Image: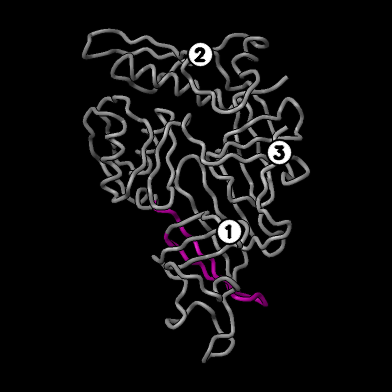
């Protein structure tokens, strides 16, 4: 049995988030924090919400608004912000980005509050919309070209397959990159200030083990055959070669982490064979078509078993983490790929992590 991954080497530790604004930790920012909520998905951009009390004893003014004057302008639009979580003795970076929105809340007997909203560096790609054409090249080259226009560094694994000319038609740069990378079964995310891209099969940001009724507080897991298939097919035309394209998914599909029987195997043994035809896409040749049907099959197969859980706050659980669950019954004990995560902290419940994860296999 896999041993549960400890959050800290200490039995008791402080898990209050550490907040840096413009590279500095300020006592007032730390002390007035009410809650933190970080959300990230396998579609890229991470978003942060921070809620503060907005009144304090301010030198020279007494009890007044905390963050609304020039001499105490700690939280303002456009400032860089970095949030670390976990054990305060050795905190781990959860988020770095830019403050993009502020919300003041006042009324009744409630103490004034300030909500600070921030997005990571991909917000530049979200806010930039273009129409342009990329010539036929490798997938890596097109990603690098699009990223260079955003002024961000890249760390790309694989993505060397040739692709036909690509059209970005009145799309944001983020939507275009998401569509292009997802089409070839890849993931993108910001690691510090670097745009990181890799095939899903190469993504393993961390490895974490959780046990029910220990760190893992609650879990829902569903194995669902509704969207499973035994193969994915594509038919098209190779203009250059003057030949028909006719391919189906093969053994090089990526099932992701875990072990057991796949959805396709259960499907064959219960409801019978089923296939899916890609009809709303195009491919230049057999090579690109094969990559597309394999990606389509992989994306379906990995969603066979889906888990949603709440655990003690753990900054190591990120999108791309391989998460091993124990104590959830022999059919569902497996290693899952985290696709969505929410790190949240408040003064009542402390630090919690909520995750969504998927696995292509079911035991039993």
The quadrant holding residue 223 is top right
Q: Which residues are magenta?
A: 98-121
Quadrant for the N terminus in the image = top right
Measuring 28% from the left and 35% from the top, which residue is drawn there? 142
Q: Residue 226 at what x, y percent from top left? A: 61, 22
Q: Residues within 10 Å of mark 2 (few under 14, many from 20)?
A: many
Indicate the secondary structure of the residue bearing disc 2: strand
Q: Residue 169 at what x, y percent from top left? A: 29, 37
- Does residue 56 sit above or below 210 in this rendering? below
Which numbered disc, 1 or 2, marks the residue closer to the eye? 1
Indicate the secondary structure of the residue bearing disc 1: loop
Magenta-colored stretch includes residue 278: no
Residue assigned mark 3: 3
- Does residue 43 sit above or below 108 in this rendering? above
Q: What label does residue 90 carry, if any? A: 1
Q: How many marks?
A: 3
Which of these two is toward me, 293 or 162? 162
Work out how far the residue at label 3 is from the one at label 1, CA to CA, in angstroms. Answer: 22 Å
Which of these two is toward me, 99 or 215? 215
In contact (CB < 8 Å): disc 2 and disc 3? no
Work out how far the residue at label 2 is from the one at label 3, CA to CA, in angstroms. Answer: 37 Å
Q: Residue 153 at what x, y percent from top left? A: 32, 48
Q: Earlier in the sequence, mark 2 or mark 3?
A: 3
Q: Residue 355 at what x, y percent from top left? A: 62, 43
Indicate the secondary structure of the residue bearing disc 3: loop
Residue assigned mark 2: 231
Q: Residues within 10 Å of mark 3 (few under 14, many from 20)?
A: few
Q: Earlier in the sequence, mark 1 or mark 2?
A: 1
Work out how far the residue at label 1 is from the one at label 2, CA to CA, in angstroms. Answer: 47 Å
Q: Earlier in the sequence, mark 3 or mark 1?
A: 3
Measuring 46% from the left and 70% from the top, which residue is drawn there? 24
């Amino acid at each position: 049995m896999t041993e549960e991954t400890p959050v800290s080497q200490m039995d008791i530790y402080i898990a209050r988030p550490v907040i840096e604004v413009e590279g500095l930790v300020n006592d007032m920012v730390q002390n007035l924090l009410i809650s933190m909520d970080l959300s990230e998905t396998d579609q890229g951009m991470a978003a942060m919400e921070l809620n503060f009390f907005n009144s304090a004893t301010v030198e020279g003014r007494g009890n007044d608004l905390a963050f609304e004057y020039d001499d105490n302008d700690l939280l303002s639009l456009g400032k860089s912000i970095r949030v670390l979580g976990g054990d305060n003795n050795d905190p781990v970076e959860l988020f770095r980005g830019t403050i993009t929105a502020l919300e003041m809340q006042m009324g009744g007997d409630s103490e004034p509050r300030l909500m600070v909203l921030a997005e990571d560096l991909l917000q530049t790609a979200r806010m930039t919309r273009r129409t342009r054409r990329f010539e036929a090249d490798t997938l890596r080259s097109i990603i690098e070209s699009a990223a260079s226009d955003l002024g961000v560094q890249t760390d790309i694994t694989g993505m060397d397959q040739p692709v036909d000319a690509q059209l970005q038609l009145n799309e944001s740069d983020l939507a275009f990159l998401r569509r292009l990378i997802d089409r070839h079964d890849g993931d993108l995310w910001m690691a510090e200030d670097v745009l990181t891209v890799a095939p899903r099969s190469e993504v393993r940001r961390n490895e974490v083990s959780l046990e029910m009724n220990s760190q893992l507080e609650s879990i829902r897991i569903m194995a669902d055959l509704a969207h499973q298939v035994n193969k994915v097919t594509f038919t098209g035309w190779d203009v250059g070669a003057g030949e028909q394209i006719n391919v189906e998914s093969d053994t090089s599909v990526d099932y992701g982490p875990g072990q057991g029987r796949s959805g396709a195997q259960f499907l064959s043994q219960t409801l019978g064979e089923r296939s899916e035809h890609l009809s709303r896409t195009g491919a230049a040749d057999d090579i690109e078509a094969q990559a597309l049907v394999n990606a389509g099959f992989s994306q379906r197969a990995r969603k066979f078993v889906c888990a949603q859980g709440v655990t003690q706050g753990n900054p190591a659980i990120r999108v791309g983490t391989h998460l091993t669950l124990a104590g959830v019954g022999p059919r569902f004990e497996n290693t899952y790929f985290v696709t969505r995560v929410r790190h949240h902290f408040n003064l009542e419940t402390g630090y919690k992590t909520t995750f969504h994860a998927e696995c292509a296999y079911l035991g039993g």
